[in-house]
Amino acid sequence: MDEKDWQILLTLHEEKNITKAAQRLFISQPALTYRIKQLEKEFKTNLISRGKRGIEFTVKGEYLVHYSREMRNQLRDAKEHISNLEDKVKGTLRLGVSGLFARYKLPLLLKEFLSLYPDVEISLQTGWSSEIHQMLQKEEAHLGIVRGPYKWQENKMLFQEERICIASSKKIELKELPFLPRINYETDQSLRNTIESWWQETFTVPPKISMEVDRIETCKELVLHGLGYAILPEICIKKDEPLYTFPITLRDDSHLLRETWVFYRDVTTDLAQVKAFIDFLNDSKQ
């Protein structure tokens, strides 16, 4: 059993389908089936079973999947540490980043970072902050950039705070909001909770939600065309856009804020590329 077999088992475990796993691995379906049979022959046991819902792993198969994941991670860590034995900042930097931050802030940051450290390779995964948080807990990323009040026991850095705003195509008043059409968008649960808590503290009636869309960019376009208002974090509001915006103010006259955090583990700072990126972000903080 070798590195290719680890990847075969992990991919098949994720897909639960021979055809899809073979496509992801860029091998033929018969070749994948043959290799699974060879592994079963090597370990003298059945690793998978085929059911109506696709591939299911046996208890022994699940154990080998766990073993494969551990071995893959150990090999990856060994390669990273050996790469860092040189004085030069190089190696792969594995990042997990909130999708919204990745859309509006990350490209410029990475461009500037790579101009300073051209020998660093970036491995990037984006998603909801909750997904990035889970990635870090599973040690699938060196460093995570998450938005919202997530708990983290190791190192963290507050990168920025931004206001949450009311946005519309024309001037509106706060007291009018319960009677105007609101456009909602799919977002991380932490932001949804923040907005809902503020609304409940401010108004006695529910919002008049007229549209539900999957992306914040779609929501903003609908707002720009006068189809309703939205509650948006400042990160996605450009200065040159013809939007009327005003920040949400709390009862103590402070603003409703959205925080962006950088999370990372103590052990990852031993890697030169991780330490360099943390120092770079610290210098770039707003």
Image (cartoon, rainbow, N blue to C red):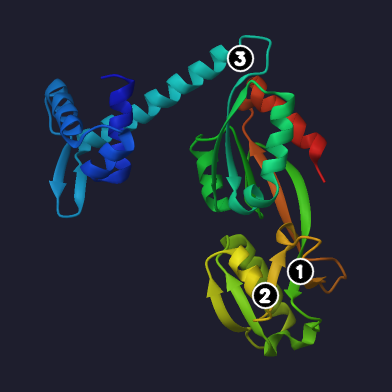
First of labels 2, 3 by sequence position: 3
Q: How dense is the environment of label 3, judged by Cα within 10 Å: few (below 14), some, or many (20 and up)?
A: some
User: Residue under circle 3?
Assistant: 84
The picture places residue 250, in percent across and down from the top left corner, at: 81, 72
Give the distance between the C-alpha atoms of the residues marked 3 and 1, in whole angstroms: 44 Å
Judged left or right of residue 180, residue 189 is left
The residue lying toward the viewer, choosing from 200 and 110, is: 110
Residue most toward the top? Answer: 86
Q: Residue at x 27, y 30 (%)?
A: 64
212 and 155: which one is in front?
212
Query: Mark 1 or mark 2, which has the lower sequence index?
Result: 1
* Residue placed under numbered mark 1 in the picture: 165
Q: Is residue 203 left or right of residue 80?
A: right
> In x, y percent, where is residue 157?
73, 41
* Residue 67 visible in this rendered orientation of the protein: no
Q: Amino acid at mark 1?
A: Cys
- In the picture of the structure, the residue carrying the numbered disc 2 is 223
- Circles 2 and 3: CB atoms closer than 8 Å: no
* Residue displayed at 67% across by 66% down: 194
Which amino acid does the dot numbered 3 rest on? Asn
Q: What is the x, y in percent for residue 13? A: 29, 40
Q: Residue at x 62, y 63 (%)?
A: 217
